[in-house]
Amino acid sequence: MDAALPTEPAVLPSPPVVDTVTEEPAPAARPSLPAAYEQLAQRVADLVEPAVAELVTARRDKWLARIALNMIETAKLLDPITRIAVARCLTLGSLVAAVGLASWLGWLIYQAIMVDKAPWPLVGCLAVAEAFLLPIIWRGQPKAPPEPSR
């Protein structure tokens, strides 16, 4: 079996080499433009440049106007939401303040009653203040402020 395998790879014949000399033409030097053409090109550039600058400015202004319009529309959408959120936060803050003040006044009344020589006019004033605070606590959520007229 080893005798059947070639020991050296077979070499294929290469195609014949033909020596043909092709002379490539040298690149032609660019002829210089006459001064009249350069002046014409400069005049065209002077005429076109302001129009291009105006076009770029107009596009930028249009883009900025579109952004401003989107911001205004977003503010109009968020206005009712922010009014409701602010009203709820203020209501919650007043409720917490009323409950805290009522609790403190209740503790103060209790301490005044527990003293043997209680200053009853002070206890009466604290009880009246407590009576004014309790409706604030029980009143609940007020309506959102009316929308401003535009």
Image: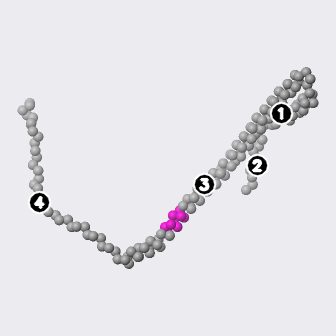
Q: Position of residue 24 (x, y in %)?
A: 20, 65
> Residue at coordinates 58% horizontally, 56% vertically from top-left?
67
Residue at mark 3 to residue at mark 1: CA–CA distance: 46 Å
Q: Amino acid at mark 3?
A: Asn
Query: Callout 3: 10 Å neighbours few (<14), some, many (20+)?
Result: few
In the image, residue 135 lies at what x, y percent?
83, 35
Q: Position of residue 113 (x, y in %)?
A: 88, 24
Q: CA distance from mark 3 to mark 4?
A: 74 Å
Q: Is residue 19 left or right of residue 64?
A: left
Upstream in the sequence, badge 1 or badge 2?
Answer: 1
Identity of the amino acid at label 1?
A: Leu
User: Which of the two discs, 2 and 4, labels the residue nearer the N terminus?
Assistant: 4
| Between discs 3 and 1, the one toward the N terminus | 3
Quarter of the image for residue 43 reads bottom left
Counting residues from the start of the chain, the first of labels 2 and 3 encountered is 3
* CA neighbours of label 4 inside 10 A, class few (<14), some (14 to 19), many (20+): few
Q: Quadrant of the N terminus?
A: top left
The percent position of residue 56, horizontal first and vertical second, equals 51, 64
In the current view of this chain or complex, which residue is farthest to the front? 117
Please name the residue that numbered disc 1 is placed on: 134
Among numbered discs 3 and 4, the one appearing first in the sequence: 4
142 displayed left or right of 59: right
